[in-house]
Amino acid sequence: MPAVTLKLPDDLKSRINELAAASGKSPHAFMVDALAAQTAQEENRRAFVRSALEAREDVARYGLVHEAAD
């Protein structure tokens, strides 16, 4: 696994250290988990937007929609 260097503000590094210790994790593990969670959230957001755009194209192409009352 390649190493990555992050330059963090002192206050953020302190907050990470405190929260990592409280959760029983190393600061490294805490940051890896946080990056993985943020990455998954962004991937999900992009998939949602992509799906919405595809649905909009389908409506424009076919004009098939359901009324809210249905």
Image (cartoon, helix red, strand yellow):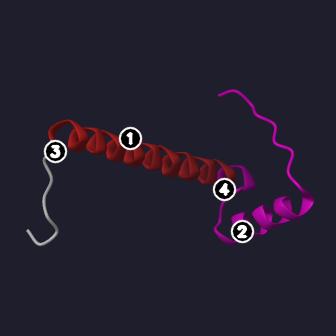
In depth, the one of 8 and 32 nearer the eye is: 8
Determine whether, in the image, residue 27 is placed left or right of residue 43: right
Q: Is 20 within the magenta?
A: yes
The residue furthest left is 70
**Image quadrant where residue 51 sits:** top left
- Name which residue lies at 76% across and 62% down: 16
Where does label 1 land, which residue?
Answer: 50
Where does label 2 land, which residue?
Answer: 19
Q: Which quarter of the image is occupied by the N terminus?
A: top right
Secondary structure under the numbered disc 1 in the rendered image: helix
* Contact, mark 2 vs mark 4 (Cβ under 8 Å): yes
Secondary structure under the numbered disc 3 in the rendered image: loop
**Image quadrant where residue 47 sits:** top left
The residue segment tinted magenta is 1-30
Query: What is the CA distance from the residue labelled 2 to the residue labelled 4?
Result: 8 Å
Where does label 3 land, which residue?
Answer: 63
Give residue 48's position: percent from left, percent from top.
Answer: 38, 48
- Name which residue lies at 14% across and 64% down: 67
In depth, the one of 29 and 34 nearer the eye is: 34
Q: Which quarter of the image is occupied by the C terminus?
A: bottom left
Q: Amino acid at mark 4?
A: Phe
Query: What is the CA distance from the residue labelled 2 to the residue labelled 3?
Result: 51 Å
* Contact, mark 2 vs mark 3 (Cβ under 8 Å): no
How many neighbours does mark 2 have within 10 angstroms: few (below 14), some (14-19), or many (20 or more)?
some
How many neighbours does mark 1 have within 10 angstroms: few (below 14), some (14-19), or many (20 or more)?
few
